[in-house]
Amino acid sequence: MKIVLKGLTKLFKSRNKDAKEPVVAVKNFDFEIPDGKLIGLLGPSGCGKSTALNLISGLETPTEGKIFFGDEDVTDLQPEFRGVGMVFQNYALYPHLTVRQNITFPLENFKKPNKLTKEQKEERVLNVAKLVEIEDLLERKPSEMSGGQQQRVAIARALAKQPKVLLLDEPLSNLDARLRLQTREEIRRIQRETGLTTVFVTHDQEEAMSISDMIIVMKKGEVQQIGAPQDVYDDPTNLFVATFLGTPPINVFDGRIDGGALYIGSDKISDVDCGVQGKVTVGIRPEGLTISDEGVLNCALKSVEVMGRDTSVVALNENLTSQALRAIVSSENARLAKPDLTFKVNADKLFLFDAESGLRIPFSAKDACKG
Amino acid sequence: MDNIDFKKLSRGARIRRGISSGVIYFCLAVWAIIVVFPFYWMLLTSVKSLGAYYSETVPQFFTLSPDFKNYVTAFTEVELGRYFLNTIIFTLITTALMLFTAILAAYAFSRLQFKGKNVVFTLFLSLMMIPSELVVITNYVTITNLDLRDTFTGLILPSVTSIFFIYLLKENFEQIPDELYKAAKIDGTSDLKFLFKVVVPICKPTIVTVVILKVIECWNSYVWPRLITYDPSHYIVSNGIQQIRESGFGRENVPAMMAAVVVVSVPLIILFTIFRKKIMEGVSRGGTKR
Amino acid sequence: MKFDKIKAWLYLLPALVFLAIFMVYPLIDVLIYSAEENYNFASQTFTGIGSENFLFVLSDPYFLQALKNTFILVIITVPLSTGLALLISLGLSSIKTLRHLFQTVYFLPYVTNTLAVGLVFMILFKKTPYSDGLVNVLIKLFGGEAVDFIDGPYAAKMFVMCFYTVWVVLPFKILVLTSALASVNTDYYRAAKVDGTPKWRIFTRITLPMISPMLFYLIITGFIGAFKAYSDAVALFGTNLNEAGMNTIVGYIYDMLYGDSGGYPSYAAAAALILFAIVLTITVINLIVSKKTAINAK
């Protein structure tokens, strides 16, 4: 089932009593979520991504705009009529009920003519339990299980009623790092097996990038960019998206374009053709920098951090606006590190942004300064 | 599943929700009226003149010519002013003594190490379950034998202890991080100084709650004052109201009675409006009294 | 250091002194009183040790009347007030506008002097030769017959007593239940809503199990409180409760101590111990039931 959002907007009354302006949680959402895909709704906390999810589930009603499931307008439909399954951040498993009772709970709400017989209910519970691999835990109480197991039960409960759409609100945030890796693979697998259109909300870009078919990056209620994770990473529309995606984060400099050439401080980085003059913001991905005697960017070495296969070179540059410059280089390349070093810059990993608006400035590099 | 008209179901659900919230508001409003009405009625009656009150065969729901003479009567014909003063003295001293003993005891239980601490604390807690009716008999005899009837001492002393407040304060004191205590010890701060300069200021919200709850308790106490005061010179407001009910104002002067009731109720209602949040919080944390 | 060892006891001393004199000693003393037969308050002498005090109290028609009144009061007001408080709290938690106002208003009776407001209730319900009282005017308006609720038939007096008791105890119960309801994680309700759970089912399967500890707490304290009813009765019917036929167990205890019928601490002690035994039994039963229910809910 594809989901279509048309001009979807949600305003909240401000909690601050003096403020007359309402808070815009979701602003003018206009996009389509294709059928059967896993979509990551990504953004920093407070950006309205949970509100967006609640609008899709029907727990919140939009101030403006429409929501379609397939061709059906569900904007005014209460959640129970939408056929969505939802997994909550803290799982919301009923503590006084066993796993089996928890999973059966939504099935008991079916009304005629969809009412299930006892056998049908048991079969469904068993099926979803098998799918999420918890068939041995059915008689336990939530409190007797680990976080990862509770998470599976929550997913099983959401799937039991055979929803058209599965929604997950920060599904991994309550798990420790190791379980998180494991569980996100699990979510990917379950989504593949069921083929359900699935939307999940997260503030963790790595999580979203690793399992999503498509990510939607949000900031302050507005969609910044939609696309396949790699496409968004390689081709960010603005400074926010560029800085939000990627670990370690992109290096950001104050730069300027003078006579068709890009300068960071007094270092000429590259000849560029972009029809802009004056101040720009420059972003260079850590993997776009390599140490070289013929490099173009002069820096002072701070430290070299070995991370196993790769090495992270930390350096300082006075035009840097992000915390410290980081370059991810091979260990051979790292051996070239010395107190005053220069970096070569890979133009594919270099982005220019408008110094005011942060919007991407497209350019073509003329010079062969790439490494 | 597709043969169901979800739109229709949805609309039905919305209408039902609308009706039910209307019913809820109606019921809540009815109870609110039942709660407020006695207060309204006492205010109203207190400003009706005696003549007007008794000439109404059907009670009137408002009066356009309020008469405040009843308040004068309430203060002159019965010694309401004195009862008021007595109550204030009783409340203040009892609360202060309670606070002093409770803070010291709570500190000992929460911070100090001594042999038998757990045993003593368990005994304290088990005493919490003893109903006051059991001990009041002997206390009455004790106070009588000590010739303390009709004195403030007799009125106050048995009302001082409150294990529940010691318990509440102890729980609160324990939330102060150990590091603070250790730091103070290293700096050579005495326990007493630490208690009054650090613990008490940090726990002020709870202490204020305890004080308010005790003040309400004192202001409304009736049983013990009734047992121990024979002479109106030591009556507190509850006794005063009872006296007024039985014999005050000659023949049944209902408006004057109501004036007295208003006067007695107002201080606590003012206290409530100021400390509404604190009081409700404190009570929901375990003000099981009454 | 020696001082350190006794320091803690010094901190405890004031509280311990008060407790020893006014709680521990009386507790032992009350047992002694209850056993001393024919104790004379003036000469402080008694004739023997035995169960005669208990036998006297248990055969005293005033005590039996008080016992009956108290039991009726408990049986009516505890379920009624708890149920009503639950309904009101549920109503409160389902609304947004005016919620704070309602909560504040509902709490008012808690901070008022029981005696004072009781007097207002008496005025509202009383029927005098010159006026029927407001409640009776209302009854007549709906075609009923005026009743004197204060000096009239037993059922009418009991009604006022129960009504006033509920009015007085409700604020606390509403407060506790609203905060219990508010502490239930809203995600449970949201999850139930996404699953289309009907309201009634949400209430019985989610809300009720989640707040059941608080509910049992209220029922237990409600029983204890109702068994100790006294000042409400005084407020409505005056100090001579025996004559009004509206005495309570606690009232009986005080009457045995004080006033015209007073001067019998032994009888008072026996009655107090009987009350304590009743309350203890009911509390233990309550605890057993609540444990059982809690296990079943698990």
Image (cartoon, rainbow, N blue to C red):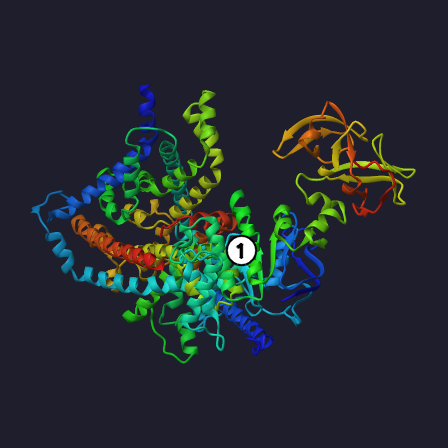
The residue sitting at the right extreme is A259
Q: Residue at x 47, y 49 (%)?
A: A147
Q: Quadrant of residue A120?
A: bottom left
Residue A68 at x, y percent in the picture = 66, 68
Other-residue count near label 1 (Cα within 10 Å), few / some / many at <14 / 14–19 / ≥20: many
To which chain does the residue with label 1 belong? A
Of the 4 image quadrants, the one containing the N terminus of chain C is top left
| A352 over C280 or under it: above or below | above
In terms of depth relative to the viewer, which is nearer, B199 or B237? B199
Taking the view exactly as shown, the residue that stands out farthest to the left is C47
In the image, C63 versus B29, the foreground residue is B29
Residue name at image x 41 percent, y 26 percent: B191
Type of residue at label 1? Phe
Mark 1 = which residue? A88
Where's residue B20, x and y in %?
51, 71
Q: Is residue A83 above or below residue B131?
A: below
Is the residue C228 above or below the residue A320 in the image? below
SS type, badge 1: loop
